[in-house]
């Protein structure tokens, strides 16, 4: 095909950058597992989610050495549990759903940023490496009390018995 030189150069640049972006996308999503928080698992009865396992017993459960599962429900305008206490370095598997409308859970300065949809279970794992207190809040507008919807994650030092 007969093409002017500049056209060929620009086509090469265009195709090259497209290929580069696709490679970056592929590496991030398949290699590094970066993807939007997903809702693979469906709960059976979204209307009465708090009567069905595991959401009939929300709480913080130890599932391994310094590994915890947080079973949590969200609803207008709070969370159950609202306060999570875990030792430093704990790997926490969040399993969260909503009992009514779409809510969110966002922990500032971490990668915990989830959308909670009725009828779905949102799962995410995060390791809390530093001691301290994290606020978590709802970041999906859910009604008149939206700005009140929050809780705390307290990461304590297991060596320090006074905390
Ligand atoms: Cu729940 Cu905003």
Image (tube, helix red, strand yellow):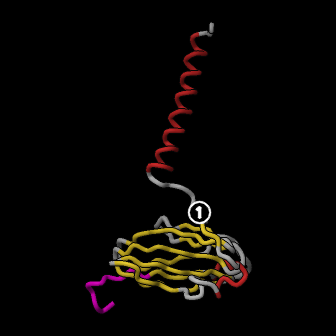
> Is the residue 162 above or below the residue 124 in the image?
below
Whether the magenta-drawn stretch holds residue 63 is answered as no
Q: Is residue 148 left or right of residue 129?
A: right
Q: Residue at x 57, y 76 (%)?
A: 96
Whether the magenta-drawn stretch holds residue 160 is answered as yes
**Which residue occupies the foreground of this view, 98 or 79?**
98
Furthest residue toward top: 2
Determine which quarter of the picture holds residue 149.
Answer: bottom right
Q: Position of residue 151 (x, y in %)?
A: 54, 82
Q: Position of residue 4 (x, y in %)?
A: 61, 9
SS of the residue under disc 1: loop
Q: Which residues are magenta?
A: 154-163
Q: Position of residue 67 (x, y in %)?
A: 38, 76
Q: Position of residue 97 (x, y in %)?
A: 62, 76
Furthest residue toward left: 159
Judging by the rendered image, the residue that carries numbered circle 1 is: 38
Determine which quarter of the picture holds residue 95.
Answer: bottom right
Determine which quarter of the picture holds residue 64.
Answer: bottom left
Main SS type for the magenta part?
loop
> Is the residue 24 above or below the residue 152 in the image?
above
**Which residue occupies the foreground of this view, 3 or 23?**
23
Q: Is residue 47 left or right of residue 67?
A: right
**Which residue occupies the foreground of this view, 14 or 45?**
45
Few, some or many residues within 10 Å of mark 1 (<14, 14–19, 20+): some
Q: Quadrant of the C terminus?
A: bottom left
Disc count in the image? 1
Q: Residue at x 35, y 81 (%)?
A: 87
């Amino acid at each position: 095909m007969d093409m002017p030189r500049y056209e060929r150069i620009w086509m090469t640049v265009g195709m090259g950058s497209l290929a580069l972006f696709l490679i970056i996308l592929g590496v991030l999503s398949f290699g590094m597992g970066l993807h939007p928080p997903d809702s693979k698992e469906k709960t059976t009865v979204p209307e009465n989610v708090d009567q069905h396992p595991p959401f009939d017993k929300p709480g913080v459960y130890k599932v391994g050495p310094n590994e915890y599962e947080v079973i949590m429900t969200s609803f207008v305008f709070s969370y159950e549990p609202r306060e999570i206490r875990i030792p430093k370095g704990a790997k926490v598997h969040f399993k969260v759903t909503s009992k009514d409308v779409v809510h969110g859970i966002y922990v500032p300065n971490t990668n915990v940023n989830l959308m909670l949809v009725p009828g779905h279970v949102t799962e995410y794992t995060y390791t809390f490496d530093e001691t301290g207190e994290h606020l978590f809040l709802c970041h999906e507008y859910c009604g008149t009390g939206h700005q009140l919807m929050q809780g705390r994650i307290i990461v304590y030092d297991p060596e320090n018995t006074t905390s």
